[in-house]
Amino acid sequence: MDLEKTPEIAKTIFGDRLPLAEKYAALLGRDGDTLGLIGPRELPILWSRHILNSAVVADLVEPGETVADVGSGAGFPGIPMAIKRPDIQLTLIEPMERRANWLANVVVPDLGLTNVEVLRARAEEAPVDRYDVVTARAVSALPKLVKMLEPLARKGGKILAMKGSKAAEEIAETKPLASKLGLETFEIVTVGENILQDPTTVVRIGLR
Ligand SMILES: C[S@@+](CC[C@H](N)C(=O)[O-])C[C@H]1O[C@@H](n2cnc3c(N)ncnc32)[C@H](O)[C@@H]1O
């Protein structure tokens, strides 16, 4: 299937880093199906459903913060965030060898991303109390996800979980874990509202 053409709005989102985002899209178009990184049906919606929705999550990260993206897969949301924001440091945590190797040996060097490191590991094996922000998309339902993500964040850090229309329900199911895990605040935040046709819904959890 054909790769989606770069949408006009991508220039607004990535500015002069747009060529890097286009190179990432081209690498996914070339390797995504053969290496099992992304389904062929995703290629015609690669920008609108994946790259742009991921990039805008970076708007919720403060300058200079460190971010761990857990279960990054083919690099979502971590790679678009790293392209958009060279001032933040991303660690992509992905246990599957094929995916982690593609990120580390193809995407990072081909794009020359100096603000990205790849850790081939499960979240449970990753450094604890380390990152300002921990992100995830399509890894697990929120109650299980917070148990995986919370240990990685520093005191007072935050979790940004990309979620869909069930965000409020998932928060309700997660609240019983709040005091045990130090989950202090829960918010549903919409990012890219004024520029994306399908803005991104993020559950932002502030940690004690
Ligand atoms: C459905 S994919 C989503 C990939 C990417 N985040 C995206 O949105 O396209 C889920 C990913 O989570 C990874 N994963 C599963 N269990 C994990 C764990 N315990 N720690 C870290 N990553 C995990 C899988 O290897 C897989 O790449």
Image (spheres, rainbow, N blue to C red):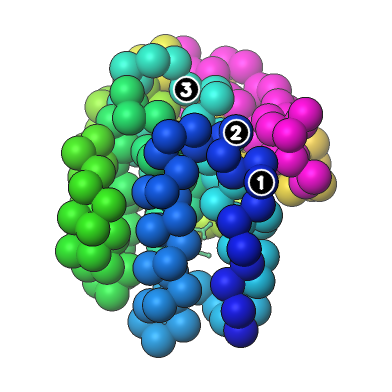
Q: Which amino acid, mark 3?
A: Val
Q: Mark 2 or mark 3: which is in front? A: 2
What's the mark number on residue 23?
A: none
Residue extent of the magenta highlight:
181-208
Q: Quadrant of the N terminus?
A: bottom right
In 3D space, how far apart are the residues under numbered discs 3 and 1 (Cα atoms)? 24 Å
> From this viewpoint, is residue 5 visible?
yes
CB-based contact (under 8 Å), mark 2 and mark 3: no
Mark 3 lies on a secondary structure that is loop
In 3D space, how far apart are the residues under numbered discs 2 and 3 (Cα atoms)? 18 Å
CB-based contact (under 8 Å), mark 1 and mark 2: yes
Which of the 4 image quadrants contains residue 196?
top right
The local crowd at label 2, few if under 14, some if 14 to 19, many if 20 or more residues have their Cα within 10 Å, is: few
In 3D space, how far apart are the residues under numbered discs 1 and 2 (Cα atoms)? 8 Å
The local crowd at label 3, few if under 14, some if 14 to 19, many if 20 or more residues have their Cα within 10 Å, is: some
Mark 2 lies on a secondary structure that is helix
What's the mark number on residue 12?
A: 2
Q: Which amino acid, mark 1?
A: Glu
Q: At which x and y percent is residue 173?
A: 72, 40
Residue shown at 47% from the left, 22% from the top: 61
Q: Mark 3 or mark 1: which is in front? A: 1
Q: At which x and y percent is residue 153?
A: 36, 27
Reply yes or no: does residue 190 show up in magenta: yes
Between disc 3 and disc 1, whose residue precedes? 1
**Relative side of 68 to 52, left or right:** left
Q: Is residue 65 above or below residue 114?
A: above
Q: Which amino acid, mark 2?
A: Thr
Which of the 4 image quadrants contains residue 96?
bottom left
- Towards the viewer: 111 or 137: 111
